[in-house]
Amino acid sequence: MIETVDLHFGYGDRSVLRGVAFTAPTAAVTVLLGRNGVGKSSLLKQFNGLLEPDQGHVVVGGERVAYDSEALRALRRRVGFVFQRPDDQLVAPTVGEDVAFGPANRDGGGDTAARVARALSRVGLDGYEDRLCSRLSNGERKRVALAGVLAMDPDYVVLDEPTAGLDGEGTRALVDLIRGLTEEGITFVIATHYPGFAAAVGDRFRVLDAGRVAYRGQSLDGADAERFGLRHFGDVG
């Protein structure tokens, strides 16, 4: 489980997160909803130490997060983070080189090729190793970024606005992909402002508003979404 306890965070004098109490249970998809600018990304980045709270703390798998370099390396092996824009994450010209980057740096290259092949297969990109990342569609680049995370065999995967730039078909495919990976035992935490996608993919729902978790539940209906200024509750696609 991922949990935050009385978590506060801000940028300079601007307070963003104000005593957040958040939980994401294991082997489930927890969706964090909220309007643009409410601090969803700032909260997600606490989960693998990309940001450090000003007050309060984060617990991952029963262990309180520490911020020394060794602890952060271990944390990031357990908690993978996929950014909203895949181009912010892809680091190599070809798909295979990009997905191999993490495992090769961690393990010295021992079984990297096998890890790459398996990760690409899990996201539906079998045989893409030699393709240029620059020639892929936005949806394919998102899958490559996710494959790079999966190649590290994380327990948790955090996705920041994963439907950004996807059409209806791409969003439906993403839902199927996430649900399949959840059945393999991966825990997902996903930020979105799109209630239709949230309802299609999620098991647990949290709404961030005014710096706090203002709603939590195992379902989310149109009235709940409207109450927090969220629109487009229609079916995915």
Image (cartoon, rainbow, N blue to C red):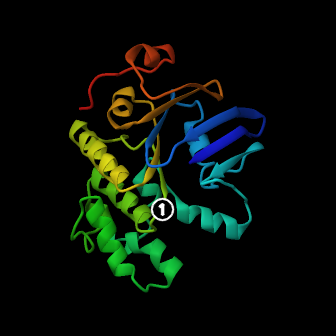
- Give the residue displayed 39% in from the left and 30% down from the top: 194
Q: Residue at (39%, 36%) from the top-left corner?
A: 202
| Residue 14 horizontal side relative to residue 29, left or right | right
Question: Which residue appears at 61% of the width and 62% of the height?
Answer: 75
| Depicted 130 relative to depicted 142: above or below | below
Please say if 69 is above or below 35: below
Amino acid type, callout 1: Pro
Q: Is residue 94 visible to the viewer in this orientation of the structure?
A: no
Q: Callout 1: few (<14), some (14-19), or many (20+) C-alpha neighbours within 10 Å?
A: some
Residue beneath disc 1: 154
Report the number of discs: 1
Q: Quadrant of residue 42?
A: top right
Q: Does dot 1 land on a helix, a strand or a loop?
A: loop
Residue 116 visible from this viewpoint? yes
State whether residue 51 is above or below residue 237: below
Q: Residue at x 38, y 69 (%)?
A: 99
Is residue 42 found left or right of 18 in the rendered image? left
Residue 34 x/y as whole percent: 51, 28
Residue 184: percent from left, percent from top: 35, 56
